[in-house]
Image: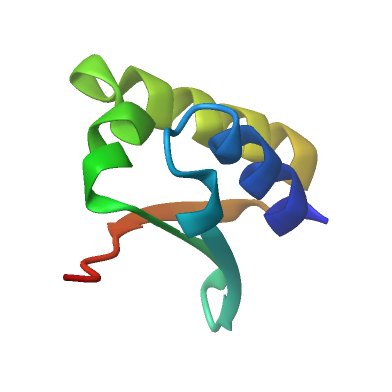
Amino acid sequence: MLADALEHLVRGVVDNPDDVTVRDKQLRRGSVLEVRVHPDDLGKVIGRGGRTATAFRTVISALAGRGGARVDFVDVDRR
């Protein structure tokens, strides 16, 4: 559910929504949501001073509740 919500939010911000993928990794320390976007969209996802990325993390942590989830943004180089 968290991965779907995050993917929906990120797709609304980027220019290349087809290149957005969110993978939910379960690690010992908890859940990690890995967001992959087109290299041209990485700046939009991170935002000025990291504000957009912080907003995404805030929304996801509110949805996650006590368990929490970490969000990592990765660019996809398809060239």
Residue 44 in sight from this viewpoint: yes
> In the rendered view, does 9 fall on the left or right side of 5?
left
Where in the figure is residue 75, as x and y percent of width and height?
27, 58
Q: Residue at x 54, y 54 (%)?
A: 18
- In the figure, 25 relative to 18: above or below? below
> In the rendered view, does 79 fall on the left or right side of 3?
left
Q: Residue at x 32, y 28 (%)?
A: 44
Q: Residue furthest right?
A: 1
> In the rendered view, does 11 fall on the left or right side of 43?
right
The answer to which quarter of the image holds residue 51 is top left
Question: Which colouring convention does the figure follow?
Answer: rainbow
> In the rendered view, does 1 fall on the left or right side of 20?
right
Of 35 and 71, the residue lying toward us: 35
Where in the figure is residue 71, as x and y percent of width and height?
47, 52
Q: Looking at the figure, which quarter contains the N terminus?
A: bottom right
The answer to which quarter of the image holds residue 11 is top right
Where in the figure is residue 62, as x and y percent of width and height?
72, 32
Where in the figure is residue 48, as x and y percent of width and height?
22, 16
Residue 66 in sight from this viewpoint: no
Q: Residue at x 44, y 43 (%)?
A: 16
Q: Looking at the figure, which quarter contains the C terminus?
A: bottom left
Q: How many marks?
A: 0
Q: Residue at x 23, y 42 (%)?
A: 40
The answer to which quarter of the image holds residue 78 is bottom left
